[in-house]
Amino acid sequence: MKKKLMIDMDDVICNGGFLHLVNKFTNKNYTLNDFEKYFLQDIIPETKKEEWINFFANNNMYERACFIGSAFETIKKLNEQYEIFIVTAYLIKDGIQISGGVLEDKFNWLQKELPFINPCNYVFTDNKDIIDCDIKIDDKLSNLTGNAKIKLLFTAYHNKNLTDKELNKKNIKRIHTWEEIADILL
Ligand SMILES: [Mg+2]
């Protein structure tokens, strides 16, 4: 039986789309290195939040999403050896009511960009601790809870300050690239 591998989508498989929309809305030119906190939209003032949610609802962030490094090639190879589950959150902070549209955009991107992954193995949830897999890869520390033998934290703007000591305590290993994932899992 193939081992079960959970892979997160945003900031692990792809990125750039959300940042593009934040830049378009604020008319700025931020890069991910300008952020330390998880929610990029926190730089938008409270008074503009409603406008932001409307803007976000009318745009598809995955139109501008790009694969991170060799994610595509590596996932294709991993797919031959593992049963892959794409486990991705879709609820938009301060805009739960528009989250259905995000779910649709995620589904369409996965279908188009990773056509070899069985859609039965898409899991759309914000509660990733319910997932029981052999291996979990995510950029958000709190998503690496629950059962797994190997837990890999993918380096991202918001998790750079977590120390190896902290991660070791939770039995989590930091990885920076898809090449490192290939070295560990292939
Ligand atoms: Mg993520």
Image (cartoon, rainbow, N blue to C red):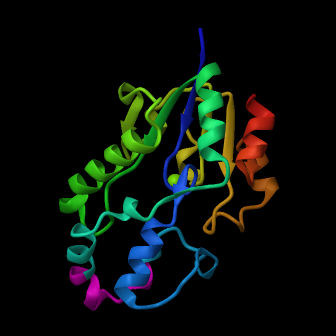
- For the record, the magenta segment spans 42-51
The number of numbered discs placed on residues in the rendered structure image is: 0
> What quarter of the picture does the N terminus occupy?
top right
Which residue appears at 58% of the width and 51% of the height?
Answer: 12
Which residue appears at 58% of the width and 79% of the height?
Answer: 31
Which residue appears at 67% of the width and 48% of the height?
Answer: 70
Which residue appears at 24% of the width and 77% of the height?
Answer: 55
Q: Name which quarter of the figure residue 163 lies in.
A: bottom right
Residue 174 point in image, percent of width and height: 75, 50
Q: Is residue 99 magenta?
A: no
> What quarter of the picture does the C terminus occupy?
top right
Residue furthest to the top in view is 1
Examine the residues drawn in magenta and state their main secondary structure: helix
Q: In this picture, is 22 found above or below 87?
A: below
Q: Name which quarter of the figure residue 155 lies in.
A: bottom right
Residue 14 versus residue 88: which sits nearer the camera?
14
Q: Is residue 135 left or right of residue 165?
A: left
Q: Is residue 112 left or right of residue 175?
A: left
Residue 175 versus residue 111: which sits nearer the camera?
111
Residue 140 point in image, percent of width and height: 56, 54
Q: In this picture, is 10 found above or below 148?
A: below
Q: In this picture, is 16 found above or below 54?
A: above
Q: Is residue 169 visible?
A: no
Q: Is residue 15 visible?
A: yes
Residue 78 point in image, percent of width and height: 64, 29
Residue 97 versus residue 54: which sits nearer the camera?
54
Q: Name which quarter of the figure residue 24 lies in.
A: bottom left
Residue 115 versus residue 155: which sits nearer the camera?
115
Residue 128 point in image, percent of width and height: 46, 40
